[in-house]
């Protein structure tokens, strides 16, 4: 066990428009919505297969973190990224980079990049290691 980190509780993404983000994460990605607070424009979604939460809200003046539309590198798992991207596109989502094979020294997998309405990018991958 690490002396510094013991797990991942939540990932927070800054957004501009809570209703548009809500539609994307709920209706396009199919995530289960746990909270939508209209007054604060805060959203919380469950990430399947994990206890980690995906939270989002507009960035407040002076708030630290990455601005809306600048997040990248968060990897979402799916056993078939090709099928996942086909469904994301059918539901109106944006595919930034279509699924493609990736070869590494420790194995191969398929990876694609999608974007939410603000331009925050997420990787969809079937990597298991």
Image (cartoon, rainbow, N blue to C red):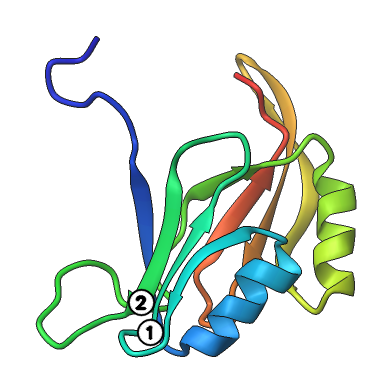
Q: CA distance from mark 1 to mark 2?
A: 6 Å
Q: Which residue corresponds to mark 1?
A: 41
Residue 53 placement, left or right of 95: left
Among the two numbered marks 1 and 2 on one chain, the one whose residue lies closer to the N terminus? 1
Element on which disc 2 rests: strand
State the quadrant of the C terminus. Answer: top right
Residue at point 52%, 59% (across, down): 45
Q: Position of residue 78 (x, y in %)?
A: 74, 40
State the quadrant of the N terminus. Answer: top left
Q: Quadrant of residue 89?
A: bottom right
Q: Nearer the viewer, residue 110 or 47?
A: 47
Residue 115 placement, left or right of 45: right
Question: Is residue 111 shown above or below 15?
Answer: above
Which label number is shown at residue 66? none
Q: Position of residue 49 (x, y in %)?
A: 61, 34
- Number of numbered markers: 2
Camera-side mark, 1 or 2: 1
Q: Position of residue 12 (x, y in %)?
A: 35, 60
Q: Quadrant of residue 55?
A: bottom left
Residue 59 placement, left or right of 24: left
Q: Nearer the viewer, residue 74 or 109?
A: 74
Categorize mark 2 by other alpha carbons within 10 Å: few (<14), some (14-19), many (20+): many
Q: Are marks 1 and 2 in contact (CB under 8 Å)?
A: yes
Question: Is residue 125 shown above or below 1?
Answer: below
Categorize mark 1 by other alpha carbons within 10 Å: few (<14), some (14-19), many (20+): some
Residue at point 65%, 23% (across, down): 128
Element on which disc 1 rests: loop
Question: Is residue 79 shown above or below 88?
Answer: above
Residue at point 41%, 88% (across, down): 38
Q: Which residue corresponds to mark 2?
A: 57
């Amino acid at each position: 066990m690490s002396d510094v980190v013991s797990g991942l509780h939540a990932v927070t993404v800054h957004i501009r428009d809570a209703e548009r983000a809500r539609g994307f994460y709920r209706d396009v990605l199919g995530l289960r919505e746990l909270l939508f607070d209209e007054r604060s424009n805060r959203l919380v979604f469950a990430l399947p297969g994990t206890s980690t939460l995906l939270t989002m809200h507009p960035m407040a003046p002076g708030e630290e973190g990455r601005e809306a539309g600048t997040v990248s590198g968060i990897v979402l798992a799916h056993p078939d990224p090709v099928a996942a991207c086909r469904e994301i596109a059918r539901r109106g989502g944006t595919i930034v980079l279509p699924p493609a094979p990736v070869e590494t020294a420790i194995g191969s997998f398929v990876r694609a990049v999608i974007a939410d309405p603000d331009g925050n990018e997420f990787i969809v991958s079937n990597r298991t290691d």
